[in-house]
Image (tube, rainbow, N blue to C red):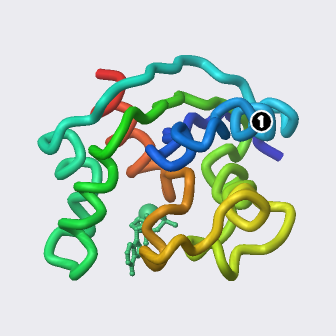
Amino acid sequence: MTTEIEETLVIVKPDGVARNLTGEILRRIEAKGYQLVDIRMLLADRELLEKHYAEHEGKPFFESLVEFMQSGPVIAVRVAGHRVIEGFRSLAGSTDPSSAAPGTIRGDLGRDWGLAVQQNLVHGSDAPESAARELALWFG
Ligand code: IDP
Ligand code: MG
């Protein structure tokens, strides 16, 4: 068994901040036993978001996603823990909040407000390579 500590990037998206859910989201991360290592609130600019979402460039929702992510402040968090990349994705739930499982952040707190699956409260890195890339982008 490995006890290697991983790090992941969590973002509370503009809908999560606007709905005052930051505390509830961070509470769930801490309650699971993960460590908050660094945190910053910022209005993300287009350049940062285009790099962050580079894998989705060219998809029909890309432009609207980048605009949504600039619509208000976000909270970027460096989170550490054993298997935290997979673990936070599990806490977050599946992408579409209307079908995300109850018990998850998206399943309990998110729903479809008319913009399909865009407003789903949180981002979490999906693999060690993307976590390293995204943490470098958001925390330098
Ligand atoms: P993930 O956040 O669960 O990893 P991705 O497929 O990587 O989901 O998509 C990134 C983000 O893009 C989603 O969290 C959501 O905000 C948005 N998104 C994904 N698919 C759609 C779509 O079909 N329409 C609008 N927005 C989408
Ligand atoms: Mg993703």
Disc 1 element: loop
Q: Which quarter shows the C terminus?
A: top left
* Ligand 2: image quarter: bottom left
Residue 30 placement (x, y as % from top left): 79, 30
Name the amino acid type tagged 1. Thr
Left or right: 118 as drawn, with respect to 87: left
Q: Nearer the viewer, residue 84 or 31?
A: 31
Which residue in the structure is indicated by mark 1? 3
Q: Is residue 127 visible?
A: yes
> Residue drawn 72% across and 57% down?
109
The answer to which image quadrant residue 92 occupies is bottom right
Residue 75 placement (x, y as % from top left): 48, 31
Dot 1, how many residues are within 10 Å of its Cα: few (below 14), some (14-19), or many (20+)? Answer: few
> In the rendered view, would you say 78 is above or below 38?
below
Q: Nearer the viewer, residue 54 or 20?
A: 20
The answer to which image quadrant residue 98 occupies is bottom right
> Residue drawn 53% across and 17% down?
38
Q: Is residue 124 visible?
A: no
Residue 110 placement (x, y as % from top left): 65, 62
Q: Nearer the viewer, residue 84 or 41?
A: 41
Instruction: Give the number of marks.
Output: 1
> Residue drawn 83% across and 46% down?
1
Residue 127 placement (x, y as % from top left): 49, 56
> Residue drawn 67% across and 40% down?
21
